[in-house]
């Protein structure tokens, strides 16, 4: 077993990464799931290889991280795949664990990299290699009340993540409602924003689907409000759940955790989860920053990654309530160069 420690600058948090011993699982005829390690609390991302008559399709990629390269090398060897046999790479969304190695595999194989047209714009904006985007994020976290020492750790972490999505691929667009051939099958491309603005799922006629991070078992997909992206990602996400609920999805191959065979039941649980969290955020918002509300809603955060995602998740809930007219957002200047954003629930007595 390889045990590898990743030091996060300016923080005492360590992750232990275990090499996954059996990362290749056949999940359907000609479809293989590869468990690719990631240096985040989630531990792995599930990527897929589909065998075709004259080559292979890769769905999602992992990120630049030595254990990920090892997992892919094992998979290519076990399945006897020559790099030039990779015909296309499809990325469900441009989050680092799904997108990070797309450029690497494109350079290695010459394969086109497909994302939803809209997600190509997001990836180009999100992963600007000059770090300008990261400065914007640091300002955003501070405006929402994150203590400056933690904000510095978050900034360092963002810069590490940026390094893990290099090199960037040349991207080709997919279009909502169109189909794409994977193996012998045609898959419908369905735009499902919320977890990422340009997130897609791919569904074929018999009910099998590649579903990225739209619906996950055991854990809830992170719904984050990032600066410069969708203003109400939770609203988008709940609308996406409505959109896909009645699709005939019998076997969903997700980006993390177990294969989903109880599609509509799991969607109902996810809706109930967000309704409960909206209530908690509503009750906690009394002229507070998002960070103060976050600490009340998520009292047991253990790492910088958890903190950053919890704050972004809290913000998506607060902004959903603002959009519904149930909460107000107010900017307050604390010092000439320091402004914070405060949220207050509109209670019946107000
Ligand atoms: Zn993911």
Image: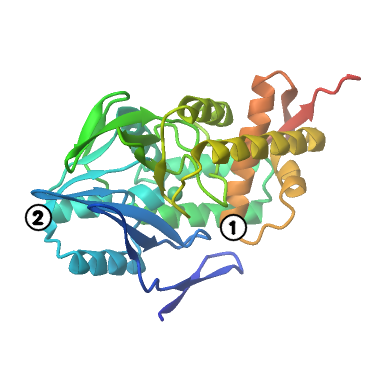
In three-dimensional space, the C-alpha distance between marks 1 and 2, rounded to whole angstroms, equals 39 Å
Q: Quadrant of residue 159?
A: bottom left
Residue found farthest to the right:
349
Q: Where's residue 310, x and y in %? A: 63, 47
Which residue appears at 46% of the width and 71% of the height? 17
* Residue where numbered disc 1 is placed: 304
Circles 1 and 2: CB atoms closer than 8 Å: no
Q: Is residue 146 left or right of residue 139?
A: right
What is the quadrant of the N terminus in the image? bottom left
Which residue in the protein does label 2 denote?
84
**SS category of the residue bearing label 1:** helix
Task: Give the residue displayed 52% in from the left and 34% down from the top.
Answer: 227
Q: Nearer the viewer, residue 273 or 261?
A: 261
Indicate left or right for 179 with 315 as reference. left
How far across and how far down the image is residue 20, in percent? 40, 71
Residue in front for this viewpoint, 155 or 204:
204
Towards the viewer: 58 or 33: 33
């Amino acid at each position: 077993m390889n045990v590898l420690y990743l030091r996060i600058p300016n923080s005492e948090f360590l992750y232990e990464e275990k090499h996954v011993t059996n990362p290749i699982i056949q999940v359907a005829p000609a479809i293989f799931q590869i468990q690719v390690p990631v240096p985040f609390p989630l531990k792995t991302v599930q990527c897929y290889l589909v065998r075709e008559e004259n080559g292979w399709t890769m769905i999602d990629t992992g990120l630049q991280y030595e254990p990920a390269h090892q997992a892919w090398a094992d998979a290519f060897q076990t399945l006897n795949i020559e790099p030039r046999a990779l015909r296309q790479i499809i990325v469900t969304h441009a989050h680092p664990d799904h997108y990070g190695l797309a450029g690497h595999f494109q350079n290695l194989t010459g394969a086109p990299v497909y994302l939803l047209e809209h997600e190509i714009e997001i990836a180009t904006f999100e992963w600007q290699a000059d770090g300008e985007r990261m400065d914007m994020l640091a300002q955003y976290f501070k405006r929402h009340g994150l203590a400056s020492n933690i904000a510095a750790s978050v900034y360092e972490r963002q810069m590490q993540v940026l390094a893990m999505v290099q090199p960037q691929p040349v991207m080709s667009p997919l279009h909502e409602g169109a189909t794409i051939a994977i193996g012998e099958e045609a898959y419908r491309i369905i735009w499902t924003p919320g977890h990422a603005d340009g997130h897609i799922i791919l569904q074929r006629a018999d009910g099998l689907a590649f579903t990225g991070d739209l619906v996950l078992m055991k854990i809830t997909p992170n719904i984050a409000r990032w600066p410069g992206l969708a203003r109400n990602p939770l609203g988008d996400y709940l609308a996406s759940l409505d959109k896909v609920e009645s699709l005939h999805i019998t076997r969903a191959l997700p980006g993390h955790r177990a294969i989903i065979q109880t599609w509509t039941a799991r969607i109902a649980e996810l809706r109930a989860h967000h309704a409960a969290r909206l209530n908690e955020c509503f009750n906690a918002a009394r002229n507070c920053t998002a960070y103060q509300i976050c600490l009340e809603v998520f009292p047991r955060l253990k790492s910088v990654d958890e903190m950053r995602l919890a704050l972004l998740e809290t913000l998506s809930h607060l902004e959903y309530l603002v959009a519904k007219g149930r909460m107000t957002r107010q900017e307050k200047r604390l010092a000439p160069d320091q402004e914070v954003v405060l949220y207050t629930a509109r209670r019946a007595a107000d």
